[in-house]
Amino acid sequence: MKRSHSVALATVAALGVAAAAIHARFTSDLALAVDRTAQGSVVIATRCGPIEYQEAGQGTPLLMVHGSGGGHDQGMAFARVFAQHSIRVIAMSRFGYLRTPRPADASPEAQADAHACLLDAMGIAKAAVMGASAGAPSALQTAIRHPDRVSALVLLVPIVYKPRTVAESAPPLSDRFDALLMRLLGSDFLFWAGLHAARDQVIRYVLATPPELLAAASAEERARVDTMAEGILPVSTRAAGLRDDTGLGKRLGSYPLASVRAPTLVISARDDGFGTYAGAEYTASQIAGAKFLGFAGGGHLWVGHDGEVRAQIVELIKRSAPP
């Protein structure tokens, strides 16, 4: 009896030590994530309200509109390299992300107007606009509502409308993604725990990318995916924007795509877990002169194609740069 009691006490003590270690690691990682989101950004007053952004480089302006779970930090993590090509990268936080508040009207149309307001506040007459994933609707609406402000348009793995007559290229994970994301919203610990205990599932369902692709990917590509996954923390400061993005594709109606005048590049992969390929291909087909860059594989993070994607984006921006 005494031995059983000792074993029980030892077990409780070991669990307590493990819990303390987990809590310490989580607290440290969260503090680092919070510090990272504050680095390099400022909040500027605009006609549409305060907007957070950061910038890098000089030359042709590029407004980088991040995807779901992002912010100015996610946008700059992808787009900073363009600063090496005489491109002035402006990465902003959309409504409800980090230090950009969510207004009563957080529609893609209102967000598009806020993009124009940000350019106004920065004294920029015209810019290339790139929208990734859930950032694509507002980027597209900017080209529709403010055509004179957009020198080129890039829609990267875009969440966009497609008619019901357009067949899916791959079954989307949206329902499973919505359920998982709603459980994680607002809980930094749950998301952090998922990264450590079920990383492949986070990559498959939250980043909509087959994790098996990473086995054959370069070290640089694996690092890029890891940075994207870990960059969603702290999820609590992105919760308002994430809620709006959840199920966004189901709420989108058709846009007057024929009115888009900006040179346009649309990019997607057939195995994108969010099923963006069919909508991306349809969108490109409806915009005069648009180029569609489609890959057979790569998932939502276009694994294995990052170099080609970046080269195509740079080529479009430089070719379309205003004098």
Image: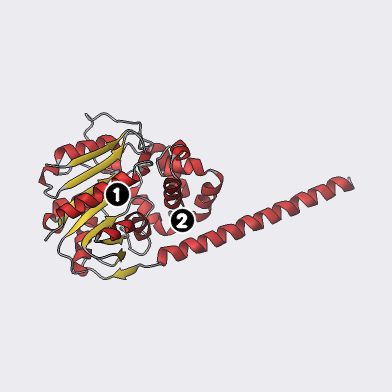
Residue 316 versus residue 205 in the image, above or below: below
| Chain-order first, disc 2 or disc 1 | 2
Residue 59 versus residue 158 in the image, above or below: below
Query: What residue is rendered at 65% in x and 54% in y?
Result: 19
Residue 253 versus residue 147 in the image, above or below: above
**Quadrant showing the N terminus:** top right
Q: Position of residue 239 (x, y in %)?
A: 40, 55
Q: Position of residue 221 (x, y in %)?
A: 42, 46
**Quadrant showing the C terminus:** bottom left
The answer to whether residue 14 is left or right of residue 216 is right
> Which residue is tagged 1?
310
Q: Is residue 103 visible?
A: no
Q: Position of residue 293 (x, y in %)?
A: 25, 39
Within 10 Å of disc 1 (Cα), the crowding (few <14, some 14-19, many 20+) is some
> Which residue is tagged 2?
233
Quarter of the image for residue 101 reads bottom left
Query: What residue is rendered at 46% in x and 53% in y?
Result: 230
